[in-house]
Image (cartoon, rainbow, N blue to C red):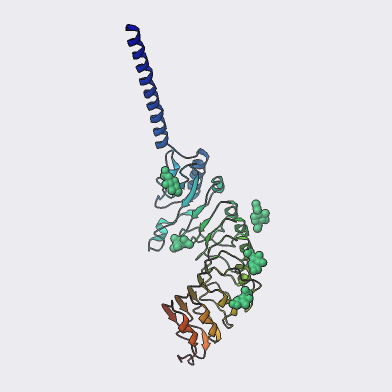
Amino acid sequence: MGNSSASIQLVLLITLSGILSLKTIQLGLCSADHYVGCIYIERKALLMLKQGLTDPSDRLSSWVGEDCCEWSGVGCNNITRRVNMLDLCNRDGYADEATDHAFGGEINPSLLVLKDLAYLDLSMNNFGSVQLPSFIGSLEKLKYLNLSGASFGGIIPPNIGNLSELLCLDLSENIIEPIENDLQWLATLSSLKYLNFEGVNLPKATSYWLPTVSMLPSLVELHFPFCGLSILPLTLPSINFTSLLVLDLSYNSFNSMIPPWLFNLTKLEMLDLTDNSLTGKLPDSLGYLKSLRYLDLSDNSFQGSIPKSIGNLKSLEEFYLGSNQKTVHYT
Ligand SMILES: *[C@@H]1O[C@H](CO)[C@@H](O)[C@H](O)[C@H]1NC(C)=O
Ligand SMILES: *[C@@H]1O[C@H](CO)[C@@H](O)[C@H](O)[C@H]1NC(C)=O
Ligand SMILES: *[C@@H]1O[C@H](CO)[C@@H](O)[C@H](O)[C@H]1NC(C)=O
Ligand SMILES: *[C@@H]1O[C@H](CO)[C@@H](O)[C@H](O)[C@H]1NC(C)=O
Ligand SMILES: *[C@@H]1O[C@H](CO)[C@@H](O)[C@H](O)[C@H]1NC(C)=O
């Protein structure tokens, strides 16, 4: 009797302590879940980056403490805890006091420590026309690179062409010098869906920019306005960019007819050719672009009448044709 109750107590004790130690383990796991932290060398790399940047309004004041995944603008993979996103966009960039919040200074190559970095946004800062450091081309995992309005100068380093996983490249409104820019490196970015060169002066690339981008098979949006381009070739060796939905070639100096290959881009929803010197009659083939919602042909030198086929464009919501030759008229 005494023996059996002792053994029951023993069993209870063992069970209880079992439960307790399970509880302890669970608590341990729980607290490990809470305190996940970030990778030490990645934190050090971010601190070196911070050190190189000028930050007049102290936007990086949260970059202290152990867990760099909690710092503002830093994103981590929630399982590996590696930094995969760096959003340093100056969101006040369009305001009057923009420069008060802009980062400047040096982009430390310590960035290369962030091996899983997939998203890098430096837009609307002011890097004072220094050249974009070429080590950016070694951030192999980059999918999103936004340098819009970041005031980089010099040439675009050709080794950006090594970023084979890049889906989105926005270089718009940078101050990039006209003379030496070469765009051959674009040819290798075969995953690109979005490409924006707005305001980047590209006269040196005028003869081959289009044959190069027309090879990119995944492109959905292509923006080349204000690029100082003058040649819109009438034929192309190959038209691989047939997934294009948005094509913006406005504010250049194209002075030919509308090239026939344009009508192979039958998925186009937005076509902007405004403010060039395009000539000739508006072709009947415009009617092939059945998905068009927005069509801007204004400020060119088109002549003749508007083709009846425009009536086939059932999705068309906006159509601009102002400031062409006086003879353009509706039939
Ligand atoms: C981890 O991230 C993925 C994708 O970013 C998300 O769907 C998921 O909910 C996250 N898990 C936790 C526990 O936050
Ligand atoms: C890049 O950044 C600019 C300015 O912050 C923003 O307006 C633009 O939409 C971004 N581009 C892309 C493709 O996300
Ligand atoms: C990156 O690109 C440059 C210039 O295009 C090239 O010389 C270099 O070999 C490339 N590096 C790698 C690792 O592919
Ligand atoms: C482009 O298309 C041509 C023919 O349609 C094909 O031979 C070529 O491999 C394609 N190139 C790319 C980069 O997809
Ligand atoms: C453009 O489309 C036409 C017919 O729709 C086709 O015959 C032609 O081969 C295409 N051109 C190219 C370069 O793919």
For this rendering, which residue is in front, 36 or 63? 36
Tell me the residue at 50%/39% (across/down): 39
Q: Is residue 302 visible?
A: yes
Tell me the residue at 39%/23% (across/down): 21
* Rendered location of residue 145, percent (x, y): 52, 57
Residue 211, above or below 305: above
For this rendering, which residue is in front, 31 or 176? 31
For this rendering, which residue is in front, 183 or 46? 183
* Rendered location of residue 321, percent (x, y): 46, 84
> Image check: 260 left or right of 83?
right
Q: Residue furthest front?
A: 1
Q: Is residue 232 visible?
A: no
Q: How many marks?
A: 0
> Image check: 246 left or right of 137?
left
Residue 254, above or below 137: below
Q: Residue furthest top?
A: 2
For this rendering, which residue is in front, 216 or 11? 11
Q: Quadrant of the N terminus?
A: top left
Q: Within the image, what quadrant is residue 154 found in?
A: bottom right
Residue 121, above or below 253: above
> Image check: 126 left or right of 215?
left
Tell me the residue at 61%/63% (across/down): 186
* Rendered location of residue 295, percent (x, y): 47, 78
* Rendered location of residue 231, percent (x, y): 61, 77
Q: Within the image, what quadrant is residue 233 found in?
A: bottom right
Q: Within the image, what quadrant is residue 24 found in?
A: top left
